[in-house]
Image (cartoon, grey):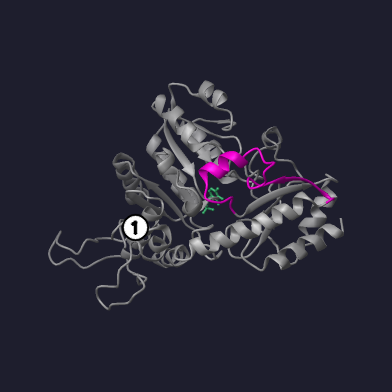
């Protein structure tokens, strides 16, 4: 395909009419194996742990959206992260954001720590600290931006340049931004990770993960992991994510527009103490986010002036449209309590150090009518 723009790629990249029937949508190839004409002679697929046409279409689509040479999909976002750690091997260390998705923190510390992959956590907004934390054993810089749940922004280009000057590779977890808002490989990253469960799938009906890279060595090593360890998504899951990516650009525009309105509403609300959203001009990440991202995303977190647990619980239980649930990036709005939900696997002392308080409230702003969403929050705040 000639070099098309994002929205066209979202709809078309990696997909062509089914060669057997002309079906315009890539079918769900629900098969475990493929008939060979003679031993070793086949139409490109042998066994579905290694490859499947529905999966291949999704991989090509995601690679196009990230502007990458290679896309590799997994059964979940953490399975994608797990594959990267297995490629690293023992004795090699990870330097990660101290404001990290809780599941990745648990994977690093509790699953891979005992296998000799150590991880260290630093404030990635402070380049000097990052440089001082790099040692000869550091193999990987693990960035998340915007971060979860504090919605902080880190400089992908500056950190990639720094890491590369020490021979360290860079992974960016791009789940919060999606490729529509931010393309880390163009900013120097070596690998992009997605939980496709979130914005890429977009409808809260599937779990999946993906890695994109331009690096042939990483691609080969990761595909070897897929074949050998087998954390592959089923064809129906791939189909659902592929259906989601077709409207990614449309959904993201509404997520961003709605989140901007919600952030502005909270920012001026007398009962709200702090608002974390990089699209607020007063936000420490505003200038960088404006340079690095197309828009500011659909995630907002906040705390109350009355910063006690009862008040926070009152808001968390007081919304009707915003559903109290983990996860993010779906069409419906969600409200959550990171300290007891998504980030419960991070020890309290570690959470407090980075400013993730017990009373922080996180919103995944959906694509509903913005006036209904604002009214819902208004009502919940009224009773505090
Ligand atoms: C959800 C999430 C993950 C993990 O993905 P799963 O699909 O739940 O395994 C990783 N990183 C971020 C930022 C996430 O939000």
Classify residue 45 by image quadrant: bottom left
Label 1 residue SS? helix
Indicate whether 334 appears above or below 88: below
Quick one: 113 or 152, which is closer to the camera?
152
Image position of 277 (left or right of 64)? right
Quick one: 9 or 307, which is closer to the camera?
9
Quarter of the picture containing the C terminus is bottom right
Residue closest to the far left: 38
Q: Residue at x 50, y 59 (%)?
A: 207
Indicate whether 212 appears above or below 259: above
Quarter of the picture containing the N terminus is bottom left
Q: Which residue is drawn at 53% across and 58% down?
A: 199
Image position of 193 (left or right of 18)? right
Instruction: Judge whether residue 93 is colored magenta.
Output: no
Position of residue 101 measured from the top left corner of the image (x, y, whole percent): 58, 44
Position of residue 23 measured from the top left corner of the image (x, y, whole percent): 32, 77
Indicate whether 195 appears above or below 283: below
Instruction: Judge whether residue 280 is colored magenta.
Output: yes
Does any atom of ligand 1 lie closer than 8 Å to the CB of label 1? no
Q: Mark 1 points at which residue?
A: 60
**Mark 1 neighbour density, 10 Å: few (under 14) some (14–19) many (20 or more):** many
Position of residue 42 measured from the top left corner of the image (x, y, whole percent): 17, 63
The answer to whether one can see residue 178 in this image is: yes
- Magenta span of residues: 270-297
Position of residue 254 measured from the top left corner of the image (x, y, whole percent): 59, 62
The answer to whether one can see residue 321 in this image is: no
Q: Which residue is drawn at 50% across and 33% down?
A: 114
């Amino acid at each position: 395909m000639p070099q098309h723009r994002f929205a066209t790629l979202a709809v078309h990249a990696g997909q062509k009419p089914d060669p057997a029937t002309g079906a315009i949508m890539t079918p769900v190839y629900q098969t475990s194996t493929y008939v060979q004409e003679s031993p070793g002679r086949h139409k490109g697929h042998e066994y579905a742990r290694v490859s499947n046409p529905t999966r291949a279409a999704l991989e090509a689509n995601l690679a196009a959206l990230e502007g990458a040479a290679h896309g590799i999909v997994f059964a979940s976002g953490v399975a994608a992260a797990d594959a990267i750690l297995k490629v690293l091997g023992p004795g090699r260390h990870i330097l990660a954001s101290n404001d990290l998705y809780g599941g990745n923190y648990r994977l690093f510390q509790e699953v891979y720590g005992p296998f000799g992959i150590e991880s260290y956590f630093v404030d990635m907004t402070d380049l000097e600290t990052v440089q001082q934390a790099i040692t000869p054993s550091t193999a990987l810089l693990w960035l998340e931006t915007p971060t979860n749940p504090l919605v902080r922004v880190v400089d992908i280009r500056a950190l990639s340049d720094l890491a590369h000057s020490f021979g360290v590779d860079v992974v960016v977890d791009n789940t919060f931004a999606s490729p529509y808002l931010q393309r880390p490989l163009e900013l120097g990253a070596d690998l992009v990770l997605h939980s496709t469960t979130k914005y890429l799938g977009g409808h809260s009906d599937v779990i999946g993960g993906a890695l994109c890279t331009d690096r042939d060595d990483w691609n080969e090593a990761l595909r070897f992991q897929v074949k050998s360890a087998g954390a592959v998504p089923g064809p129906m899951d791939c189909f659902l994510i592929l259906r989601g990516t077709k409207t990614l650009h449309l959904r993201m525009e509404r997520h961003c527009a709605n989140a901007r309105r919600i952030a502005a509403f909270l920012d001026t609300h007398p009962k709200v103490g702090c608002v974390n959203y990089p699209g607020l001009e007063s936000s420490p990440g505003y200038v960088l986010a404006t340079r690095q991202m197309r828009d500011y995303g659909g995630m907002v977190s906040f705390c109350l002036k009355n910063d006690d647990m009862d008040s926070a619980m009152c808001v968390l239980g007081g919304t009707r449209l915003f559903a109290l649930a983990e996860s993010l990036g779906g069409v419906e709005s969600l409200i959550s309590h990171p300290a007891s939900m998504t980030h419960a696997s991070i020890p309290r002392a570690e959470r407090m150090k980075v400013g993730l308080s017990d009373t922080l409230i996180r919103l995944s702003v959906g694509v509903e009518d913005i006036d209904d969403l604002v009214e819902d929050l208004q009502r919940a705040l009224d009773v505090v």
